[in-house]
Amino acid sequence: MWLEGMTFADESHGALAIVEDKIAARAEAAPSDCLPIDASGWVCLPPLSEGHCHLDKTFLGAPWQPHIRQNDVLGRIGMEKQIRANLDVPVSVRGAALIEREIAFGTGLMRTHVDIDPDWGLENLHAVLELRQRYSDRITIEIVAFPQSGILRAPGTKDLLTAALSQGADLIGGLDPMAIDGDRAAHLDIIFSLASHFDVGIDIHLHETGPLGVKTISAICERALAHGRPSHIAISHGFALSELNEPEFEIIAARLSNAGVAIISSAPPRLMPPLDQLAERGVCVALGSDNICDAWSPFGNGDMLERAAIAARQQCWATDSGLAFALSLATDRTAAVLGETRPPLVAGAPADFVLIKAPCAQAALANPPSERMVFRGGRQIAGPRLGCLTGSH
């Protein structure tokens, strides 16, 4: 099968030959002796990457749940538990609704955090493990064992996290070591000890702001260096990074870069870290949706292209180079933080890509179109049929 006339992210135009699950060839045009499918007017991008979501939290697939405001993180944690305890729709249905939506948008790689605490036990983990297996031919899912209620303030959580990692979770999570658990050293001791024991990555939710947050970021960097840089250490949110003056920012950015600690943002309306400036200083950066139609936020749809557009608006990345950086957050930069190195779309590479109805990649990012065709392993898994690309074939 030849697809011809599409535009690539680097603004070049060309054709792809797909044989089984691989790209067999990339050329300026299809050979004259074949009848290619005309993909003119479509942009060919690598699969989108979702760096941070919560499959067990979403209300998608369930009746509408009115949002109830809370004043702080602890209040939200308690309110969410009450709401979810009364939901009749299980994680297996709600999580599936979000996965299918992300696949349709073009997501091929996802990191989800899953609540682990004495109230939930491993119930959420087992549901998400089943979902991962069910959709394994269409999307790759990483699972973070996430202590949403804290570790020290919820006795028994450490043992549950240990069990979660032994039963299939890929990374260990954490949450505001001082603001939630009140003991930075003890919280980080547990997380880094489990990461070393199971040889897994770390992804810590860090909402702490001001000097408190900066001290926690520095402590995480120190631990990362002391533990020989366990693979894939990330801080999600990192709000304190948005509040630094220039000299402070240079110091903390250097620490993050030296320690190999990545920053994952969800492009919040306030306190968003300057991902472009961090990247310029050698820090690995990524993007995720975070909460999608759940007790924390009624907003979000799982479209990483739209999430990157939100980030671009927040940070004024309006030039073509700025839009290209935002697009990289929805694709390869986030994939790299999640541990996936993607080859370019050339001969021999997996036939995994997304076709988006737009004149160029920057246009697709600035105004994310709904018309998309998603391919994985050479097989179309979402979008209109191939023959509907244009009216000519």
Image (cartoon, helix red, strand yellow):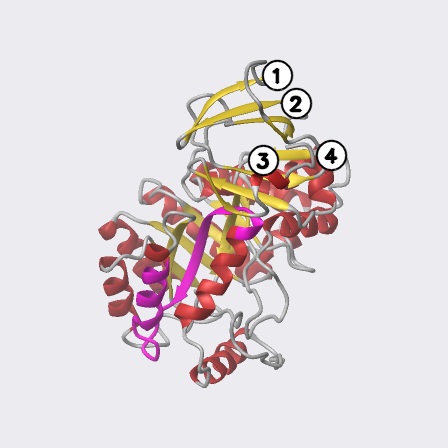
Image position, residue 296 (x, y; %) = 57, 72
Name which quarter of the figure residue 119 lies in.
bottom left
Kindly identify the residue that appears in the image at 56 percent across and 14 percent down: 31
Question: Left of 167 or right of it: where is 390?
Answer: right
177 vs 65, left or right, is: left
- Residue 182 visible in the displayed image: no
Name the element at disc 3: strand
Q: Amino acid at mark 1?
A: Glu
Q: Position of residue 289 (x, y in %)?
A: 57, 57
Q: Which numbered disc, 3 or 1, marks the residue that appears first in the sequence?
A: 1
What count of labels does the image hold?
Answer: 4
Look at discs 3 and 1 and give the one toward the viewer. Answer: 1
Of residues 372 and 291, the one drawn nearer to the viewer in this rendering: 372
Residue closer to the observer: 208 or 40: 40
Helix, strand or loop status at disc 1? loop
Query: Which amino acid is tagged 4?
Result: Pro
Which circle marks residue 359 in the picture? 4
Q: Which residue is mark 3?
A: 45
Q: Which residue is mark 1?
A: 28
Q: In this rendered view, identify the residue nearer to me: 59 or 120.
A: 59
Q: CA distance from mark 2 to mark 4?
A: 11 Å
For the question of whether residue 238 can be seen, the reply is yes
Instruction: Check the image and report above or below for 233 versus 125.
Output: above
